[in-house]
Amino acid sequence: MRRLSIRSVLHAFLSAAATTLLLGALAGCDHAPSVIKIGVAQPLSGSIGAQGQDMLNGAQLAVDEINAGGGVRIGSARARLEIVSADDKADAEAGKVAAQRLVEADVLVALANLNSGVSIAAAPIYAQANIPQLAISTKPSYTQLQLATTLRLVANDDLQSRAIGSFAAQLPGAERFAVIDDATPYGKGLADAVAADVARAGKKVPLRLSLDNSRIDFTPQMAELRDTSSDVIVAILSDFQVEALVQQLAKAGLQRMRIVGGDTLKTDKLLHSAGVVQAIFATSPILEAREFPNGPAFLEKFRKRFNGEPVYGAHYAYDAVHLVADAITRNGSVDRAHLLQRLKTFDGAAPVTGSMRFRDDGEQRYGAIAVYELRAGKWLPLMRSDRW
């Protein structure tokens, strides 16, 4: 048998050690970058720019907190988070441009988008790059694109239509419903679903109208509402349209009317309309931060950082960033495929809402719809459920 010299053994040992160190260094470069980029594509300009900026602010607050705590732990290393933002302008084509920009920036995930049409248009671009797309938009078809990367932060409009229909149908004395939408694909689809839910509850829908999304003159509809003896108006319209509708109902002597609508009604624009008609209700998949046990602490931090109140879903964006950071730490890597798998199989850290988990189809397992009533110039929460 060949006898090995001490020199040979030592040389072999040192070579193996050097190889191990080199592989470790390469692995560290691959799995523990110094910076992890979080993409945020939202409408940062235009009529809903405030809502988009709110989402960006929520994400930025989470990034600032995580970085202040030393960053995201990846094995024995740590990485700093960095926001890369893009204005999708609430437009499908602009959303595609924004998505391509985030892909080229090599973001790990994308908080995109607020509008359903934009989310759907941009989804194939994120999917091609295997980037998880976390959207706060609510149209069901977003997660029906057969793309593995489409994830939703809140409940979808299937649940919202059931919430509107179920809540409206149980209002005392409500037997005859007028269902009005803005003639957009989103509005008409939601209104059709609500009308069907109301009918299944044994109620009548003697008036079903699709009007254009800029209509503010509802004078012709006053006679129709009176002639059909409608008790409740289901209004799948924009806030400015319902603002005009309320004033015209009062002028026509129809103050007894109750209005039920979706999340497009739940804005500050309608606050001064409280008390003009008998009641105004709105549903929303975007539950307010103050409704959660940890909401007050979040609101205090948000006010201190941005000198104002959140106006939309900042706490969902905040939770989403914390969720991603938690998933990265548990995985010990920034591999996108592993990240996507983790997001669909664990209840991750969501400091405000409590927990977020995505089903295999990308829908939010813990999504709920809340009902609010406009009273004394405020939207007051009445109830919420994930099983309407």
Image: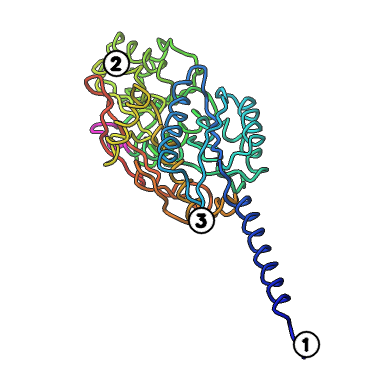
Query: Left or right of 16: which side holds 75?
Result: left
- Inter-mark Cα distance, 2 to 3: 55 Å
Q: Is residue 155 visible?
A: no
- Part of the protein shown in magenta: 167-174
Q: Nearer the viewer, mark 3 or mark 1?
A: 1
Q: Nearer the viewer, residue 96 or 1?
A: 1
The image shows a total of numbered marks equal to 3
* Amino acid type for the residue under numbered disc 3: Gly
Image-based side of 279 in relation to 31, left or right = left
Q: Residue furthest right?
A: 2
Q: Which residue is mark 1?
A: 2
| Dot 3 or dot 1, earlier in sequence | 1
Residue 286: x, y in percent?
39, 34
Can residue 380 be seen from the camera position used here?
A: yes
Q: Mark 2 = which residue? A: 273
At a point 33% along the width and 37% down the height, the residue shown is 370
Q: Is the Cβ of the residue at disc 2 closer than 8 Å to that at disc 3?
A: no
